[in-house]
């Protein structure tokens, strides 16, 4: 069996007195979609942010492709930046730069962080905007877009650095309900194209339809994991069952 593209082992993270991750393992095969689900405060976002170094766990390792980080060895900023370069992140609120156009938002990573030629980055950015259905919005500012459109720009921006893995942190939870569908649809088509994705979500329908594996977290541990047909339909663990029942 080939090694997973992304592998995290033994992630432990404490905020003050609060141990929020208690030894979390995540293995994500190339081209697959992993959904992290669980109650609020269970540690999902902290896991995701640990995968790209936005949080620094006290211990545990993260490997994406051939870039590996051992958090216990207190990696320096350069090592963390190298790990971060392997993934793209889509945030809950899109975090676009308000003073830059849509196109400039999408090219900022490739041009400024990766030093790629502007013309090449713009050409690729236009293709990505087309991909998320916003080709005609390249020259407008984020404030002129709906929340769903802004989030689709956020997705194009995350893809622009050609990451190996795309991390999504509750990408639809800040949106008005009528705007959720267009974002999930883009994510579903990216999954179909073979992007490797890790998604923190409360959208159980998305998880059921799109995920290859679901990890249920509670209290900073992975309580149960497997294909959605098992974890979401026939959960083994009482805590998973309880969580899913509360959503009904
Ligand atoms: P989830 O994504 O499952 O809702 P989080 O990973 O966001 O959970 O949070 C897990 C726990 O860690 C929560 O108790 C939260 O309050 C705490 N936490 C998260 N980030 C911080 C932080 N920067 N400082 C202190 N506590 C935090």
Image (cartoon, helix red, strand yellow):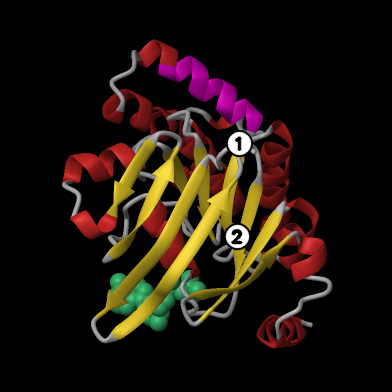
Looking at the rendering, the stretch of residues picked out in magenta corresponds to 121-131
Q: Is residue 131 above or below residue 167?
A: above
Q: Which of the pair 188/133 is nearer the observer?
A: 188
Q: Which of the pair 114/32 is nearer the observer?
A: 32
Residue 55 visible here: yes
Residue 214, percent across and down?
Answer: 67, 62
Circle 2 residues within 10 Å: few <14, some 14–19, many ≥20: many
Residue 53, percent across and down?
Answer: 32, 52
State the residue lying farthest toward the front: 1
For residue 111, side relative to residue 123 (left or right): left
Q: Residue at x 73, y 67 (%)?
A: 204
Distance in Å between CA atoms under marks 2 and 1: 32 Å
Q: Residue at x 39, y 77 (%)?
A: 20
Mark with earlier residue (2, 1): 1
Q: Residue at x 60, y 36 (%)?
A: 2
Q: Which residue is mark 1?
A: 2
Secondary structure, mark 1, is loop
Q: Which residue is mark 2?
A: 172
Circle 1 residues within 10 Å: few <14, some 14–19, many ≥20: few
Secondary structure, mark 2, is loop
Majority secondary structure of magenta residues: helix
Q: Which of the pair 153/188 is nearer the observer?
A: 188
For residue 94, side relative to residue 204 (left or right): left
């Amino acid at each position: 069996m080939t090694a997973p593209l992304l592998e995290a082992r033994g992630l432990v993270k404490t905020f003050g007195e609060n141990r929020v991750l208690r030894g979390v393992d995540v293995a994500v095969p190339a081209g697959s979609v992993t959904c992290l689900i669980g109650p609020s405060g269970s540690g999902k976002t902290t896991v995701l942010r640990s995968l790209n170094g936005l949080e620094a766990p006290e211990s545990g390792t993260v490997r994406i492709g051939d870039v590996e980080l051992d958090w216990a060895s207190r990696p320096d900023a350069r090592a963390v930046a190298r790990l971060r370069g392997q993934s793209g992140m889509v945030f809950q609120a899109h975090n676009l730069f308000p003073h830059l156009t849509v196109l400039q938002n999408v090219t900022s990573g490739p041009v400024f962080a990766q030093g790629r030629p502007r013309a090449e980055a713009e050409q690729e950015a236009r293709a990505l905007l087309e991909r998320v259905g916003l080709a005609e919005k390249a020259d407008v500012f984020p404030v002129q877009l709906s929340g769903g459109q802004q989030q689709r720009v956020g997705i194009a921006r995350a893809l622009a650095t050609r990451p190996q893995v795309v991390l999504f942190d509750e990408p639809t939870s800040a949106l008005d309900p009528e705007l959720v569908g267009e974002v999930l649809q883009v994510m579903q088509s990216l999954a179909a194209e073979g992007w490797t994705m890790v998604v923190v979500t409360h959208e159980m329908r998305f998880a059921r339809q799109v995920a290859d594996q679901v990890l249920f977290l509670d209290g900073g541990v992975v309580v149960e994991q497997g294909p959605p047909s098992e974890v979401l339909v026939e959960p083994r663990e009482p805590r998973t069952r309880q969580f899913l029942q509360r959503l009904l």
